[in-house]
Image (cartoon, grey):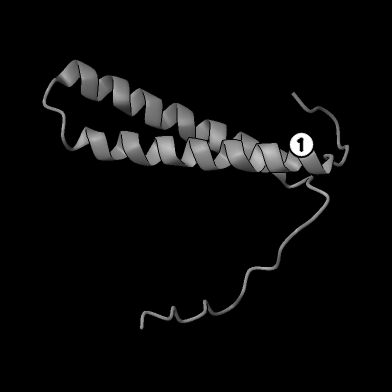
Amino acid sequence: MVTGQHTLAAHESIDLHEILNFKTLCLTKSKFMQGLVFDQELKDMLEKDVQQTILDINHLQAIYSRAPFHAPVPEFRPTPILN
């Protein structure tokens, strides 16, 4: 775990980015599955997972803010070419 206010190394930032993507996917899946499950105990477990994952993502985002590079977020997304 990273402590203090040190800047992350480039490889640490990339690894952390991958973990954030994975945790976000897990959160999405757990939220989606809550609507498909009828067993209350399983729903409760999924809700607990959702709440814990949200805390984890917030913590990881705080660490990620120390990445040595930042990509600007474009104001407008490009129009996809479909033809």
Q: Locate residue 21 relative to residue 35 in the image: left or right.
A: right
User: Which residue is drawn at the image coordinates 44% and 78% (left, top)?
Assistant: 80
Q: Outermost residue toward the top?
A: 41
Q: Residue at x 20, y 16 (%)?
A: 41
Q: Please report the residue visible at 24 percent of the width from the left and 34 percent of the height from the top.
A: 33
Q: Position of residue 81 (x, y in %)?
A: 43, 81
Q: Residues within 10 Å of mark 1 (few under 14, many from 20)?
A: some
| In the image, residue 26 above or below residue 76 | above
The residue tagged 1 is: 12
Q: Residue furthest front?
A: 83
| SS for callout 1 | helix
| Residue 38, image quadrant | top left
Mark 1: amino acid: Glu
Number of callouts: 1
Tell me where residue 82 appears, x and y as whole percent: 37, 79
> Where does the image place residue 11, in percent across and percent down from the top left?
78, 39
Q: Nearer the viewer, residue 1 or 15?
A: 15
Residue pictured at 85% horizontal, 31% vertical: 4
In the visual, does 75 lie left or right of 32? right
